[in-house]
Image (cartoon, rainbow, N blue to C red):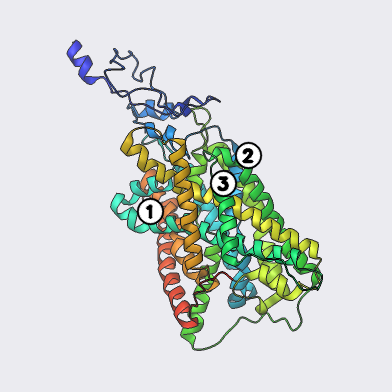
Amino acid sequence: MNEVTKSSSPQLVSCPPSQFHSPSLSRSPLLSLDNDIAPAKTPNKSRTPSRFITPLGSPLRKALRLTKLDPHDAWLPITESRNGNAYYAAFHTLCSGIGIQALVLPVAFTVLGWTLGVICVSLAFIWQLYTLYLLVQLHESPETGLRYSRYMQLCNLTFGEKLSKVLALFPIMYLSIGTCVALIIIGGSTSKMIFDLAACSGGTVCTMHRLTTVEWYLVFTCAAVLLSQLPNLNSIAGVSLLGATTAVGYCTLIWTLSVAEGRVENVSYDPVRGGSQIRQFFNVLNALGIIAFAFRGHNLILEIQGTMPSSEKHPSSVPMWKGVRVAYVIVALCLFPLAIGGYWVYGSKIPANGGMLTALYAFHGQDAPKSLLGLISIFVIINAVSSFQIYGMPMFDDMESTFTTKMKKPCPWWLRAIFRVMFGFGCFFVAVAIPFLGSLAGLIGGISLPVTLAYPCFMWLKMKKPKTYGSIWWLNWTLGLLGIGLSVILIAAGIYVVIDTGVEFSFFKPR
């Protein structure tokens, strides 16, 4: 009898101390896997051992089985601290949901026109919000009893590890690395512009030494790398709040200042048409890609939710969805006036590269108050350095995960610092070699579109298994396949536009 009991007893697997929801967190696992250190004990008579701790106790009891939790989660930046709440979720979601890419939305209207432009932006917003809801609900799985705190974990479960690397790894890497590269370019260029205006204003000959564009990239990168030394995702909640506030600030200031200055002379709202019908068709698709680029993939939602405590009575999906709803109300109040108001003011004259910010300086730079223009630039810089932290966090987590998996111990502070310095300056070198181009917005939007609009639908079908041929089944299959098909078409259109218009790479040289 003892032999049977011993062989059938489940093996205890260590879980992160964060599952205790305690304010003081340790970076070491709670339970030991070494049988010499922690000898096996007689299991409790209940079906769930008393020492087994999991945030999903009730579903596990229903499944009558135990779940293995990854002990390395307690050592990694995303899941090291689980003291998040709805406020933190709102800060992070808003900081990652609004960015400088929103300023190119009116460029899509120059091709689509008023009616089609408003319809497409509205549908993209609703579609994105729906798939975001799916991800929030999929974070905790009653079927498996696991919490999926990283987007790639759900991709691996849905598509398999090998296929998910092909389908999702590159778009997700772009959303982290590519966004950080773009932020370095935007933050460095804006820093140079505002410094030159402040130091060499007044109409006199400027004799002060001015840094080159590349040198300003380096200054911005140093500031971003220094701030990136904050240990985990919860610790940058204040940084995300600052980034979200400045994003709302410059979006609101740009469209209100543009509308207040009035429409430019000879403004036209006729959709831009030119060339053959094939070229016009691809231009329309490229405009849809720009909208997809503005609503960039929310691959950070699962990571943000992973910072929250969760229990049987208080699942993390409840505060997470509250924070997301508040954040996306603010996102809508920023993006829609920016797109509609910007197109009303500038019409087809809005520059393709830079969008609203470039148009504001080009058409109203002499008339608008210099103090407001300077404030907008400062907000852009602060938002860029803040957004760098949250978009870099998945890469920090991945680098440390490689170390902890091989070494079976937490990453020391000095190695963590080296990883983040390497990432920051790696992005700097990419920014110098391949500057961000507005003509690539449609192509990039097509590449990242499945992460936002398609994959969550397939994940829901795989995890929840809705009734076959039911309304939810048809909805998710339709949206998923439509997202994949649209992505392929937009990538083709983006490549066509890049080849047709030409790409000029600027290699900056110190002066």
Up/down of 113 relative to 327, above or below: below
Q: Earlier in the sequence, mark 2 or mark 1?
A: 2
Kind of residue at badge 2: Tyr
Label 3 vs label 2: CA separation? 25 Å
Residue at position x 49%, y 28% in the image: 311
Give the residue number, with chain letter if any, for mark 1: 469
Kind of residue at badge 1: Tyr
Res 319 seen here? yes
- Check the image and name the residue furthest to the top: 1
Residue at position x 44%, y 64% in the image: 447
Expressed as whole percent of the image width and height from the top left, the position of residue 272 reads 60, 82
Up/down of 357 relative to 74, above or below: below
Kind of residue at badge 3: Leu
- Check the image and name the residue furthest to the bottom: 275
Give the residue number, with chain letter if any, for mark 2: 87
Res 123 seen here? no
Q: Earlier in the sequence, mark 1 or mark 3?
A: 3
Q: Nearer the viewer, mark 1 or mark 3?
A: 3
Q: Nearer the viewer, mark 2 or mark 1?
A: 2
Q: Earlier in the sequence, mark 3 or mark 2?
A: 2
Give the residue number, with chain letter if any, for mark 3: 226
Residues under numbered marks 2 and 1 in contact, where contact means CB atoms less than 8 Å apart: no
Residues under numbered marks 1 and 3 in contact, where contact means CB atoms less than 8 Å apart: no
Disc 1 packing (10 Å; few <14; some 14–19; many ≥20): few
Quadrant assignment, res 141: top left
The N terminus: image quadrant = top left
Kind of element beneath mark 3: helix
Expressed as whole percent of the image width and height from the top left, the position of residue 27 reads 45, 29
